[in-house]
Image: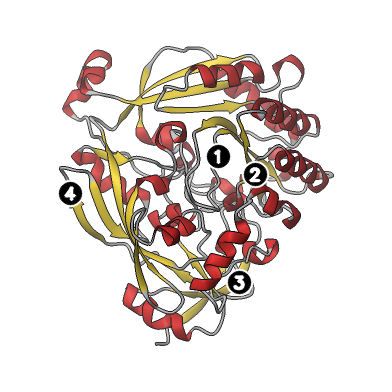
Amino acid sequence: MNLRSRVETLYPWALRPTIRAPVYRPDTSREIAAFLPSAQVEITPRGAGTAYGDICVNPCGSHLSLLRLDKFLEFDKEQGILTCQGGVTLNEVINLVLPQGWFPAVSPGTAQSTVGGCMACDAHGKNHHIRGSFAMTVKGMKLLTSDGQTHECSPEQEADLFWATAGGLGQTGVITQLTIQLAKVESSWIKTRNIPTRDLEETLALIDEHADATYSVSWIDSLARGRHMGRGIIMLGEHATMEDLLRQNPTLCDRPFELRKATSLFLPFFPPPWASNTFALRFFNAVYYRAHSRSSQTRLTNYRSFFYPLDSVKSWNRIYGRRGFIEYQVAVPLRNGREICLEICETLSRTGNGSFLAVIKRMGPGNPGPMSFPIEGYTLAIDMRAGWDEQAKILDGLDRLVAEAGGRVYLVKDSRVDSRWIDTMYPRRREWAEFVARHDPRGLFSSNLVHRLNLR
């Protein structure tokens, strides 16, 4: 079968690289199954394009958009089990299930991602230390391999293929359908508490102290220096019960499952370079820290503000300018995680490679996925404008530090790490590549990331 393609402008969320390439937009999984065996060029499966790195673009091939595979197939309202196509977004899932008392058990920091993308990236959220990654909520899925065959996979059935797909960067095939276990909730509100910290040592100590909180993440001032380096705001959260609503705001008891619009603002232009220079970012961080340090009392927050604050600005990725930005996210093990995070923060602060958006959180044990990012320890993520002086050299040095400490870079958000560190960071990469080759012997599925790092 010949699908018609159209050349479109494509980019990852971090805008690096921006390319022009063919895009296929099938309406059904049958069209994909008929198309794959006869495809003559490399195919990059693509969801909503919310991955920060070059996993979702490929200048050497074509792209297979799954956004039209957006149907809900079955919802067990009693058990909270949802079956839907891979192109359904988390926002669409929430709009369907939240009014009926359910919420995604694991969610990344944007609701614009598709569920298929969350599985291919094995997304994690603010509760990884409690619930694990997105793949841990998937009870089963349908995967189309390059020969056009459909595989029904789960942790029990074709488990090797299931886990190779979890965090497998779209290389095992096209995820057309998933069955997901949701979490039971009594409202759409989150009971939150902010705790200001004086430095990174206190930030990490309090993160560990509050490891029993369902949701936990800390914003940190990535440009603070000296005794204030790594100061932050720890944000704790729990799904609010009806009793919580009654105690804190009884009027909400009449509308416990209130939904919020996905976006409210739009940035129609690229700000000038000075808007994201070191001075501007230091000023923003200082104001943000003071504003969120005023009260540590428990309060109610709507779910969008807590889980998806950046979704309120539809095109916030433009804020760093036309050259885009780099998100440097790493995971480091518990045994030496504090020391590594401290050195990373000190290096980036000293060299001015900071951001208005830097977060650190605790992670629980990983899963059997050989290319899944999370490991037990800490994860640190810092956005930065691309092209600072000696930025590449600085980040290369941090890559070495992380790799030698037993940590890893998050490939889903990466667009610049050197391939020499990949097998150290992901020690099962060769095993995964050999397994993938058996299911895709033609090397049909690829991406700029795969070529750049020679993953296969």
**Which residue lies under the disc numbered 4?**
76
Q: Residue 408's mark?
A: 2
Give the camera-side residue of 197 and 322: 197
Disc 4 marks a residue whose amino acid type is: Asp
Q: Earlier in the sequence, mark 4 or mark 3?
A: 3
| Disc 4 + disc 3, Cβ < 8 Å | no
Give the crowd class for mark 3: few <14, some 14-19, many >=20 residues within 10 Å.
some
Could you tell me how far apart the alpha carbons at marks 1 and 3 are, in whole angstroms?
A: 36 Å
**Which residue lies under the disc numbered 1?**
375
Q: Earlier in the sequence, mark 1 or mark 3?
A: 3
| Disc 3 + disc 2, Cβ < 8 Å | no
Q: Residue 58's mark?
A: none
Could you tell me how far apart the alpha carbons at marks 4 and 3 are, in whole angstroms?
A: 42 Å
Give the camera-side residue of 415 and 270: 415
Give the image quarter of residue 143. bottom left
Q: Quadrant of the N terminus?
A: bottom left
Give the crowd class for mark 4: few <14, some 14-19, many >=20 residues within 10 Å.
few
Disc 1 marks a residue whose amino acid type is: Ile
Q: Is residue 78 left or right of residue 180?
A: left
Q: Earlier in the sequence, mark 2 or mark 1?
A: 1
At horizontal 60% and vertical 47% (from top left) the residue drawn is 410
Could you tell me how far apart the alpha carbons at marks 2 and 1 are, in whole angstroms?
A: 9 Å
Give the camera-side residue of 8 and 238: 238
Disc 2 marks a residue whose amino acid type is: Arg
